[in-house]
Amino acid sequence: MTHDAYDIVRRDVLAAIERRRLQPEADLAEVRIEARQSVDEYQRRARLGEELPLADPGDMAERIVRSISDYGALTAVLARSDVEEIFIEGARVSYLDATGRLRGLDVPTTESENRVIIERLLGSTDRQLSAQYPIVQARVMQGTARLTAAIPPVADRLSATLRRYVVRHVCLDDLVARDALGPDAAGFLWAAMQVRSRITVSGEPGAGKTTLLAALLAAAPASHCVRCCEEIREISVPVTHGGYYEVRPPGLDGRGEVSLRDLVKFVLAMRPDRIVVGEVRSAEAFELSRAVNAGCGFLCTVHANSAPEALNALVNAALMAGENVTERIVRKVFSESLDLVVHLDRDDSVQDGAPGLRRRVMQISAVAPALGDDFTCEPIFHRRALGQPLLWTGVLPTALSDRIDRVLGDGLSVRAIVEQRATVPA
């Protein structure tokens, strides 16, 4: 079964479909007939020495049908609810399941097949992958996955990642059940979400930042107006009051772009109680600094290796806006307005005798007004290592706790919530 045979047969089937004006989804039986006939014709030419014979004609016909009416070799793996991420490198396909184990696809495929699958995924979007646009990001499969792909000359071959949103409705208790954080830390974060708090979630790629962000959003009061801005939408928490907004790349004429900074600036005029930015990378951070000055709460994620690095990353991103403002002023704004940094980490581990992936909250820190030119972080919860428990330090941020206690009422307090099941290190 060769790359050329697949392309030849598929081209013949597509020509027949177009000639007969068939709709692959509606006329699947007829598409199967055309595929079998095209394979038979190919085998006839092979017997005459014009082509190389197929080892399994029936399998070839099914591959063709899947590529036209579904997602080719990826059809079965995309139908699985436990597949978290799919990686395509040329003809090679691998995927991560829910345990974090990397597995190879057991169905043969080629780079050209995989390119067809990528283009089919993009077919329902306004984005394309071509020589003019050799990199692309898009929300695909009815918004259930994020596709990131590149082709030459940017990449040396087709290179794509398809991230499934397997966790769509997650709460803080779910993360406690997974040992991502403890019940006392979950109670504290729930309480923090009852006010217009300013929280940054940091960690490396794949550490679980978006999942934690979704759980935090789920804990927010229904009366809060929440405006979520993302480059490619990943968060899918039902919002009673507010909405979701996604950037738009420039059109073929180079116009019509809506950047993440544009979105943050836009929603600031919509009276939000909290602005959510899926991932802060650039000038949108400057608009967040303006938002906190206006009294808005916010929730964002940022790539960083520690809580202090996350704060520095926010400052550096804000400076990318190119506004006439100094680093010292931006640092002062964030240090005086940010409440918490929640830092996560991940590693490979052995679970039930097989390699897997652990994602854990490593530290929840309060941000205190800077005493100098750097940020001051005070740990509230801390985990010494991934395999150890997340422990309360016994400290609670006074200003944030006072704000929360006033909202909770009925004799409730942050300290009472945390102390119910807290373990304080000796």
Image (cartoon, rainbow, N blue to C red):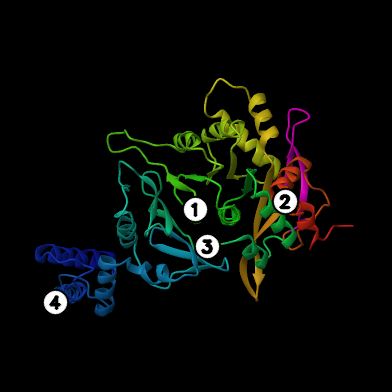
Three-letter code, disc 1: Thr
Q: Nearer the viewer, mark 2 or mark 4?
A: 2
Q: Which mark is residue 409?
A: 2
In terms of secondary structure, where does tag 3 sit? loop
Crowd rating for badge 4 (residues with CA inside 10 Å; few <14, some 14–19, many 20+): some
Q: CA distance from mark 4 to mark 3?
A: 49 Å
Q: CA distance from mark 3 to mark 2?
A: 33 Å
Q: Is residue 324 above or below residue 381?
A: above
* Residue that label 3 marks: 167
Q: Is residue 209 left or right of residue 387?
A: left
Crowd rating for badge 3 (residues with CA inside 10 Å; few <14, some 14–19, many 20+): some
Q: Which residue reaches farthest left?
A: 19
Q: Is residue 155 above or below residue 287?
A: below
Q: Is residue 264 left or right of residue 21?
A: right
Three-letter code, disc 3: Val
In terms of secondary structure, where does tag 2 sit? loop
Q: Going 47% across and 70% down the picture, which residue do you hit? A: 81
Q: Of label 4 and label 1, which has the lower sequence position? A: 4
Crowd rating for badge 1 (residues with CA inside 10 Å; few <14, some 14–19, many 20+): few
> Is residue 176 in view?
yes
* Residue that label 1 marks: 240
Three-letter code, disc 4: Arg
Q: Nearer the viewer, residue 239 or 343?
A: 239
Q: CA distance from mark 1 to mark 2?
A: 23 Å
Q: Nearer the viewer, mark 1 or mark 2?
A: 2
* Residue that label 4 marks: 44
Q: Of label 1 and label 3, which has the lower sequence position? A: 3
Q: Position of residue 379 (x, y in %)?
A: 77, 47
Q: Which residues are magenta?
A: 365-385
Which quarter shows the C terminus? bottom right
